[in-house]
Image (spheres, rainbow, N blue to C red):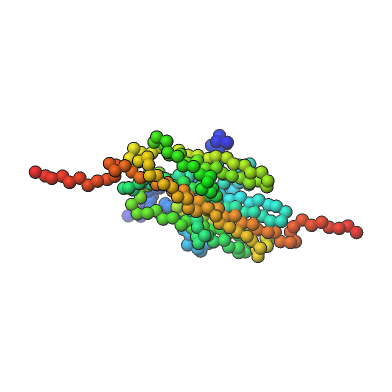
Amino acid sequence: MSLFNSLIPAFRRSPAVTSATSSKDLGPTIRPAYEVRETQDAYGLTVYLPGVAKDGLEFTVEEGRLRVAGRRAWKRPEGWTLRHRESSDANYELVLTHENTVDFDKVHAELRDGVLRASLPKHEGVKPRRIAIS
Amino acid sequence: MNIVRYTYPNRTLSPFSLLNRSPWTGLESEIDRLFDSVLSDFASTSAPDRFPVDLYEDAENAYVRAELPGISRDDIKVEVVDDTLTIEAARKLKEDDKEESFLVSRSVSLPDSVRSEGITATLENGVLTVTLPKREEAKPRKINVSVN
């Protein structure tokens, strides 16, 4: 697995910093690690946002796009000297497109230990249906 | 007289380098997207075998911060053996009915200035902060020198 990780540079390096895509003042942002799993009834979204507390989290939907923005809550105290740095100070931003398959009134989302877990139920019309043959 | 734009010889020294996009950002995100779509099923980037660790120091303590989102306190073990601090965490993956867990760990060598007792750790928003107090002799002290 580590050989595989060394072959694919994206798995080793920290993500490149991009400028924020919207007008919110997030500053430079990085894309958090995330997973989307699909079941018959819903999509399960898991976004890893270490260092983000509930008041720093924005979960919005607009124009066919789902946007998760997280602001880190920790500020380095005065007097701390840096010795070695691997994580980033940049805030998180993730934009996913949905083709109107999600019923956003029934979304359940929870942020715990820096992980956002959201269940996005599918619209009734999109769920697989049995069609009776007469 | 020509006006020529001065480019900093080393990009990281430029005061603006952190604020602007790096010229590779666009290419990098495109390639990342390509890899993600191909490999998302069997190479989970959210559960790699390493996690980022930052080291800080001030006059009183040394600090180690590790990003461990989604892991509860009981699944994290922090150990100090001789001069090495080891952080070990069990990542649990729930796949329908099966639950898999695998261990990730990082070790950090501690400088001599750190005491071996009084070490505390807190977990907040998925970030673990370990505070290691320094030995009294290692703390910066003012020494008064009288000049004759």
Residue A74 lies, in percent from the top left, at: 44, 55
| Picture layout, residue A31 above or below residue A84 | below
Residue A17 lies, in percent from the top left, at: 49, 51
Residue at x 55%, y 39% (from the top left corner)? B103
The reply to whether residue A9 is visible in this rendering is no
Classify residue A67 by image quadrant: bottom right
Q: Quadrant of the N terminus of chain B?
A: bottom left
Taking the view exactly as shown, the residue that stands out farthest to the front is B117
Q: Quadrant of the C terminus of chain B?
A: top left
Residue at x 62%, y 54% (from the top left corner)? A45
Instruction: Between residue B20 and residue A74, name the one nearer to us.
Output: A74
**Is residue B45 shown left or right of residue A83?**
right
Taking the view exactly as shown, the residue that stands out farthest to the right is A134
Residue at x 83%, y 57% (from the top left corner)? A131
Instruction: Between residue B91 and residue B116, name the one nearer to us.
Output: B116
The reply to whether residue B94 is visible in this rendering is yes
Residue at x 43%, y 47% (from the top left corner)? B121
Taking the view exactly as shown, the residue that stands out farthest to the left is B148
Residue A24 lies, in percent from the top left, at: 50, 63
Residue B23 lies, in percent from the top left, at: 48, 49
Q: How many marks?
A: 0
Instruction: Between residue A65 and residue B121, name the one nearer to us.
Output: B121
**Is residue A125 shown left or right of residue B139?**
right
